[in-house]
Image (spheres, grey):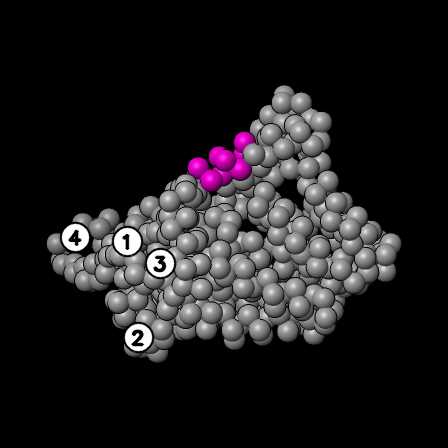
Amino acid sequence: MRSITIFFDRMVQRFLPDAFLFAIILTFAVFVLGIIFTGSSPIQMIDYWGSGFWDLLDFAMQMSLIVVTGYILASTPIIKKLLAKLSQLANTPEQAILAVTFIASIACLINYGFGLVVGALYAIHLAKRVPTVDYRVLMASAYSGFLLWHGGLSGSIPLLIATPGHFLEDSIGIIPVTETLFSWFNIFIVLVLLFTLPFFNRFLIKSRGPLQNTDATSWKSESMTENEAEDSVDIEKLTPAERLENSRIVSYLTGILGLCFVIYFFFKNGFDLNINIVNFTFLFLGIIFHQTPRRFLNSVTSAVKNAGGIIIQFPFYAGIMGMMVASGLSEQMSLWFVSISNETTLPLFTFISAGIINFFVPSGGGQWAVQGPIMVPAALEIGADTAKTAMAVAWGDAWTNMIQPFWALPLLAIAGLKVRDIMGFCVLILIYSFFPIAIGLLFF
């Protein structure tokens, strides 16, 4: 195992390009595959690519705000103290790995955007507490919690098919979350990953080999080295405009207004912890906890530096999705797996096909729109469980996120790392997680 860990880490470090170049390579790969397997002409593939290029603008803004608002909130004195307090759970590198994996997994089960930010920020505080920990393995462990998101409360596919009016309602009706999120097979997968993944990641830190410059003190991300000194202001020497910028009253009134909406939202909609309300809550808590508009804006200036990768890369993934869907390439991949399946194996092969398609369509809702109309009729035709088939798509989407940089970008931005720094360890996490997911889909 030690040799395997070292092999994957060194291979990724040597050959995996930056996340932006990874998106470029995927773009050309899908372009060529679409021409070869779907009969689309080069001009048609270019049209599909360009037409879909801006389809993720809303989502790119949401994910950028996840990074920005998470950073803003984490840089407030009260949250720093809280995370520092939680970091006292760990006194050794092994304990740091166990703690960050478990906390990140729980947070991702609550909400995926919340979990990505909390996992990264908690890992940074653990690195400050235990500077001898391998920073790359620590961040890979924080990201590994993202494996569980689609089996949790923000899982887009199970929530969608439980909502009246979804686009497949005529075929499968309304499938309640008791048959998806709270089914025995999903509970088995979630519990096994939740309680074994921390120990698997602990094993990774033991078997990573004699690599150099991996401890937390070797990494100098802005999040690791930020100046925590509070600024002091002489009120008497301020102009009226500067007094307004340093007014606590302005921040408190604005923050309270925002939190009133949050309370009203949950009262009206129940515990609907979607990404917009998470961003909204983070933003207005940040305004309150920073106490003055000036401190808040200083934090914003530092935070937006971390969102550049998301802003420029998500349109390329939207273009890839456009080529996959419009050319029919994703449909052909799904139909091939259906052709080799039976009543028992369809969920397993659906899971594997969803994992492959997730490379090119790295969005849970988008992937269901692509695969749902193919997998649901197949399940009905051969008598397979439609709820389990839907969850197989969900778990396939979550599974290969471990080696798809799309979702790692917010965490990497906060951590100050590149995708190659964690991906070698994530490959091993991907291999391990296949087994509990496959067992749950086949035997429960």
First of labels 4, 3 by sequence position: 3
Q: Amino acid at mark 4?
A: Leu
Give how far across and how far down residue 90 sits, in percent: 33, 76
Q: Amino acid at mark 1?
A: Ser
Which is nearer the N-term, disc 1 or disc 2?
Answer: 2
**Mark 2 nearby-residue class (10 Å; few <14, some 14–19, many ≥20):** some
Residue 26 falls left or right of residue 218: right
Label pair 1/4, CB-CB below 8 angstroms: no
Q: Which residue is mark 3?
A: 136
Of marks 2 and 3, which one's residue comes earlier in the chain?
2
**Where does the image place residue 394, in percent across and percent down from the top left?**
65, 58
Residue 53: x %, y % from top left: 56, 33
- Reading the image, the residue beneath label 2 is 92
Mark toward the start of the polypeptide (4 vs 2): 2
Q: Earlier in the sequence, mark 1 or mark 4?
A: 1
- The segment highlighted magenta reads 21-28
Marks 4 and 2, how far apart in space? 47 Å
Residue found 81% across the figure and 57% down from its top: 342
Answer yes or no: is residue 288 visible: no
Relative to the observer, which residue lies in front, 262 or 272? 272
Q: Residues within 10 Å of mark 3 (few under 14, many from 20)?
A: many
- The image shows residue 327 at horizontal and vertical percentages of 69, 32
How packed mark 1 is, by other alpha carbons closer than 10 Å (few <14, some 14-19, many 20 or more), is some
Spatial CA span between label 4 and label 3: 45 Å
Occupied quadrant, residue 214: bottom left
Going by the numbered disc 2, the residue's amino acid type is Thr
Residue position marked by numbered label 4 in the rendering: 238
Magenta-span inclusion, residue 276: no
* Image depth: mark 4 or mark 3 in front: 3
Q: What secondary structure is the stretch in magenta mostly built from?
A: helix
